[in-house]
């Protein structure tokens, strides 16, 4: 499969506004186009740190800034796009075969990722040139 950053898009999540505090929920296969098999999150990210720096062969993900803000740089080998995330009621859907970097983390930010599969190191490209080759470039 070839990745295309145009297939990555923001997903507006339901937001139940309430004077006691707002509530957002996410149903796999309903609000996002995959079933959720794993949730992980990045936190206590030191200033200036960068995360990511890899692509996935088959994994679908939704990335949400649960608190604070950060940037996700999407790269399919042909085009690049920087997306700023700073809302807990909207997420960035990232399809397979997209190289991603995360940076510009604000202090105290939390990045939550919903993933379509359990952790599998063999699903990763950690070498950019191997990723580019398999993108047919
Ligand atoms: P990695 O995916 O490279 O982190 P990021 O993309 O956020 O910078 O993972 C960092 C380390 O954590 C790596 O050794 C693999 C491990 N890891 C797991 O064991 N399970 C997981 O679900 C994830 C996402 C990572």
Image (cartoon, rainbow, N blue to C red):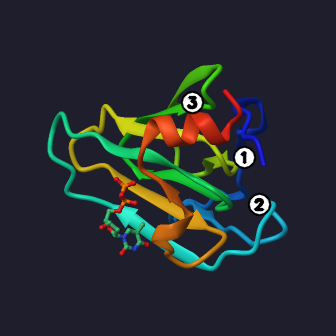
Q: Residues within 10 Å of mark 3 (few under 14, many from 20)?
A: some
Q: Residue at x 67, y 48 (%)?
A: 93
> Badge 3 is on which residue?
75
On the image, the x and y values in percent for residue 85 come to: 50, 37
**Left or right of 123 on screen, residue 136:** right
Q: Residues within 10 Å of mark 1 (few under 14, many from 20)?
A: some
86 shown above or below 43: above
> Is residue 43 something that shows in the picture?
yes
Classify residue 54 as left or right of residue 13. Answer: left
The one nearer the camera, 1 or 13, is: 1
For the residues bearing labels 1 and 3, Cβ distance under 8 angstroms: no
Is label 3 in a helix, a strand or a loop? strand
Counting residues from the N terminus, which is met first, the one under dot 2 or under dot 1?
1
**Residue positioned most to the top:** 79
Q: Quadrant of residue 116?
A: bottom right
Circle 2 sits on which residue? 32
Residue at x 45% of width, y 47% of height: 54
Q: x and y percent of residue 47 in the render?
A: 15, 38
Point out the tag, 3 or 2, that comes first from the N-terminus. Answer: 2
Residue 11 is tagged as: 1
Disc marking residue 114: none
For the residues marked 1 and 3, what is the alpha-carbon distance in whole angstroms? 19 Å
The residue at the far left in this view is 46
What distance separates the C-alpha of mark 2 from that of mark 1? 7 Å
Q: Is residue 86 at all visible to an observer of this figure? A: no
């Amino acid at each position: 499969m070839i990745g295309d950053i145009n297939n990555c898009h923001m997903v507006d999540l339901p937001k139940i506004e309430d004077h006691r505090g707002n509530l957002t929920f996410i149903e796999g296969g309903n609000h996002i186009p995959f079933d959720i098999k794993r949730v992980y999150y990045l936190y206590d990210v030191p200033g200036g740190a960068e995360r990511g720096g890899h692509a996935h062969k088959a994994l679908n993900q939704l990335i949400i800034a649960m608190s604070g803000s950060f940037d996700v740089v999407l790269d399919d080998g042909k085009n690049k796009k920087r997306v700023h995330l700073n809302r807990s009621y909207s997420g960035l859907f990232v399809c397979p075969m997209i190289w991603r970097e995360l940076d510009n983390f604000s202090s105290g930010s939390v990045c939550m990722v919903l993933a379509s599969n359990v952790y599998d190191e063999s699903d990763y490209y950690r070498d950019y040139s191997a990723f580019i080759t398999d993108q047919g470039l």
